[in-house]
């Protein structure tokens, strides 16, 4: 019996070791299984489940505050117009942060800035993320900036976590998302997406001081001309995926107490410029029945825009008359010219186009009725809506569930650089709450905690997509 006992022990040891090994080999990580179920594609063993390093809240908040100092107007407002001195200084600040994150930095001819973290397989299409830092007059310090500073911090989080991407990760700062200076929204991303109309139109573009786009770019240190403008255009499929982190610019997330909005589609925008010409005259000498008032024609058209939008009966139809300029602009002079700029949007392209048609017809009718000339009716842009990619939406859902954050599916009624990047690659957007939905005003605000939630969702989503 003494000789048999060690054999029994040996047998049981072998039995335990053998089946423990099998069990270990067949163990299924529940987090990985969840990621597979929600993403719709296998999250293979080569895709590590890792712990995220915390967002550096103090450093990130400091960056928002420092970037806001590059402004043409005093705090708390921010005004940062394309190719102005403060815009150039702000660009330098972002390039410095990219360098500190050990990203390789390059710029294209129109000032789109790219910071790349090279992956282990650099031949694969990169995963990109980013937004803009230009700001309309007297706006806030979070619109667009969350998607740039947040993207750089997401890269830093992944690096501090020991993550190594397979596909390269790239942060993009887009030139001039706002149309403030040259009347062209999303200028940088439109060019990247290959807008031939913009390539041609930009050659004639001038600002309010009659400075051409080329001269303005040259003053900012960019060598751009008609000859090299097309070098900016990206081929379709240049990126594997593109993501944008952004404040909601609406009140829903805050009102509902939801941490993250996962965007499913971006509304279709259209911009219109209209000009009327009348006779003008002295405010006291010309009697009312004899007036051909271009200013009143503009006012009537503004009300017609509201009427046509409301007639759709849809909450998704919106219209705004954001600019009315009267000439000569004196209190005692009947306006002889008026200039109107109209923005209308809808998630339904056909319905949006119907609004544009009605605005055009009203312009004709008003001009005829008031005896003024409709000297211009120009559709500046009439872009289709963009749907977010299903696999990217799934990847974001995986991230928010792993982080145990509340979320909801949303439509973006504001449009972003993502609208045009969707023409280059699959696209997705992440929204975070902002105070009362305020945006484009000094009261615009997002808490650093909400920003950190967005950064973490972005970091995990970038990590997952970079391993595909």
Image (tube, rainbow, N blue to C red):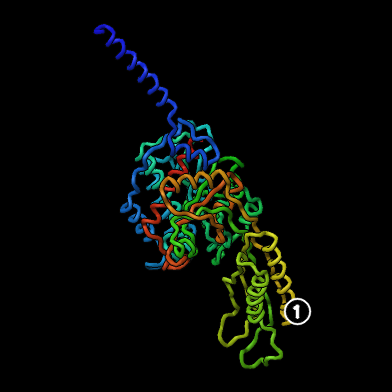
Residue 132 in sight from this viewpoint: no
Where residue 14 appears, as percent x and y from the top left, is: 35, 16
Could you say whether the residue bearing mark 1 is in a helix, strand or loop?
helix
Residue 140 in sight from this viewpoint: yes
Q: Point out the image quarter for the N terminus.
A: top left
Viewer-side residue, 245 vs 94: 245
**324, above or below 407, in the image:** below
- Pick out the residue farthest to the top: 3
Judge from the rendering whether residue 297 lies leftward or rightward of residue 263; answer left or right.
right
Mark 1 lies on residue: 368
Where residue 71 appears, as percent x and y from the top left, is: 40, 63
Residue displayed at 44% across by 36% down: 165
Residue displayed at 48% across by 40% down: 35
Give the number of callouts. 1
Residue displayed at 55% across by 67% down: 208
Viewer-side residue, 13 vs 212: 13
Where residue 458 appears, as percent x and y from the top left, is: 45, 47
- Pick out the residue farthest to the left: 2
Where residue 60 appears, as percent x and y from the top left, is: 35, 53
**45, above or below 444, in the image:** above
Q: Residues within 10 Å of mark 1 (few under 14, many from 20)?
A: few
Q: Quadrant of residue 450?
A: bottom left
Viewer-side residue, 92 vs 409: 409
């Amino acid at each position: 019996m003494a000789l048999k006992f060690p054999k029994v022990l040996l047998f049981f040891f072998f039995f335990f070791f053998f089946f423990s090994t099998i069990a270990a080999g067949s163990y299924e990580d529940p987090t990985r299984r969840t990621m597979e179920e929600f993403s719709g594609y296998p999250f293979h063993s080569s895709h590590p489940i890792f712990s995220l390093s915390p967002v550096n809240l103090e450093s990130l908040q400091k960056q928002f505050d420092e970037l806001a100092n590059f402004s043409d107007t005093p705090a708390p407002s921010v005004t940062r117009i394309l190719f102005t001195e403060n815009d150039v200084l702000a660009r330098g600040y972002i390039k410095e942060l990219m360098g500190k994150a050990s990203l390789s930095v390059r710029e294209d001819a129109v000032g789109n800035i790219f910071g790349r973290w090279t992956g282990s397989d650099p031949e694969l299409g990169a995963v990109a993320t980013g937004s803009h830092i230009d700001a309309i007059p007297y706006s806030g310090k979070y619109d667009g900036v969350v998607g740039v500073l947040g993207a750089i911090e997401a890269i830093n989080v992944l690096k501090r976590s020991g993550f190594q991407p397979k596909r390269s990760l790239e942060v993009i700062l887009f030139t001039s998302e706002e149309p403030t200076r040259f009347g062209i929204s999303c200028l940088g991303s439109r060019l990247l997406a290959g807008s031939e109309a913009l390539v041609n139109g930009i050659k004639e573009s001038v600002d309010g001081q009659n400075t051409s786009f080329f001269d303005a770019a040259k003053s900012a240190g960019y060598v751009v001309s008609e000859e090299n403008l097309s070098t900016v255009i990206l081929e379709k499929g240049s990126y594997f995926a593109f993501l944008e982190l952004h404040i909601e610019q609406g009140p829903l997330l805050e009102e509902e107490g939801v941490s993250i909005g996962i965007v499913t589609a971006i509304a279709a925008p259209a911009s219109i410029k209209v000009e009327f010409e009348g006779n003008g005259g002295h405010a006291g000498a010309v009697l009312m029945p004899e007036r051909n008032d271009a200013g009143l024609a503009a006012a009537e058209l503004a009300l017609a825009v509201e009427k046509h939008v409301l007639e759709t009966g849809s909450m998704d139809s919106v219209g705004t008359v954001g600019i009315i300029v009267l000439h000569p602009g004196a209190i005692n002079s009947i306006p002889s010219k008026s200039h109107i700029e109209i923005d209308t949007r809808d998630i339904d392209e056909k319905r949006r186009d119907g609004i544009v048609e009605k605005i055009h017809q009203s312009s004709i009718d008003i001009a005829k009725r008031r005896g003024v000339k409709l000297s211009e009716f120009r559709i500046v842009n009439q872009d289709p809506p963009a749907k977010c990619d299903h696999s990217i939406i799934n990847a974001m859902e995986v991230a928010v569930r792993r982080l145990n954050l509340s979320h909801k599916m949303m439509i973006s009624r504001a449009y972003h650089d993502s609208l045009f990047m969707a023409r280059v690659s699959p696209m997705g957007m992440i929204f975070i709450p902002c105070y009362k939905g305020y945006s484009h005003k000094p009261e615009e605000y997002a808490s650093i905690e909400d920003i950190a939630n967005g950064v973490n969702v972005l970091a995990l989503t970038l990590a997952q997509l970079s391993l595909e």
